Image (cartoon, rainbow, N blue to C red):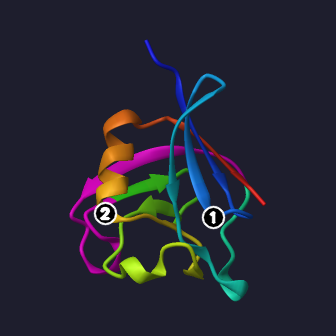
Amino acid sequence: MPKYRIIVDLSDRTLYLLDGDQTVKSYPVGIGKMLTKTPTGEFTIVNKQENPGGPFGVLWMGLSKPHYGIHGTNDPASIGREVSHGCIRMYNEDVLDLSSYVPVNTRVTIRP
């Protein structure tokens, strides 16, 4: 049984999916801008919502820090940039792929 966890590296704007200590996949992400930085620390995925509407693309995965999540986007040009209000943005196809691996309660580490 895989033991998945997520590491988001803000310095290289990449989200890594790990099984134990092995990187299984990596995805480019958009992160928080200067005034609304993405929080760092240890979190968990607390919920998932398909088709949340608005700027959240095809899927929202809420984090244990209220009002923050990993989600798709309606603005693919924002991936790889510091543009969000603190959330982690992914291409819609990437967030769907990631979601297929990680259940609610998956550990998410966000590092500077």
Q: Residue 23, located in which quarter of the rendered image?
A: top right
Label 2 crowd bin: few (<14), some (14–19), many (20+), radius 10 Å: some
Q: Position of residue 58 (x, y in %)?
A: 25, 64
Which residue carries the number 1 mark? 13
Residue at horizontal 66 percent and vertical 25 percent from the top: 21
Q: Earlier in the sequence, mark 1 or mark 2?
A: 1
> Which amino acid, mark 2?
Asn
Does 81 sit above or below residue 3? Answer: below
Which residue carries the number 2 mark? 92
Q: Is residue 46 left or right of residue 9?
A: left
Residue at horizontal 37 percent and vertical 65 percent from the top: 91
- Tell which of 8 and 69 is nearer to you: 8
How far is disc 1 from disc 2 in space, using C-alphas?
16 Å
Label 1 crowd bin: few (<14), some (14–19), many (20+), radius 10 Å: many
Extreme-top residue of the structure: 1
Q: Which residues are magenta?
A: 41-59
Residue at horizontal 45 percent and vertical 55 percent from the top: 62
- Tell which of 66 and 41 is nearer to you: 41
Extreme-bottom residue of the structure: 35
Give me the disc on residue 60.
none
Does 65 sit above or below residue 72? Answer: above
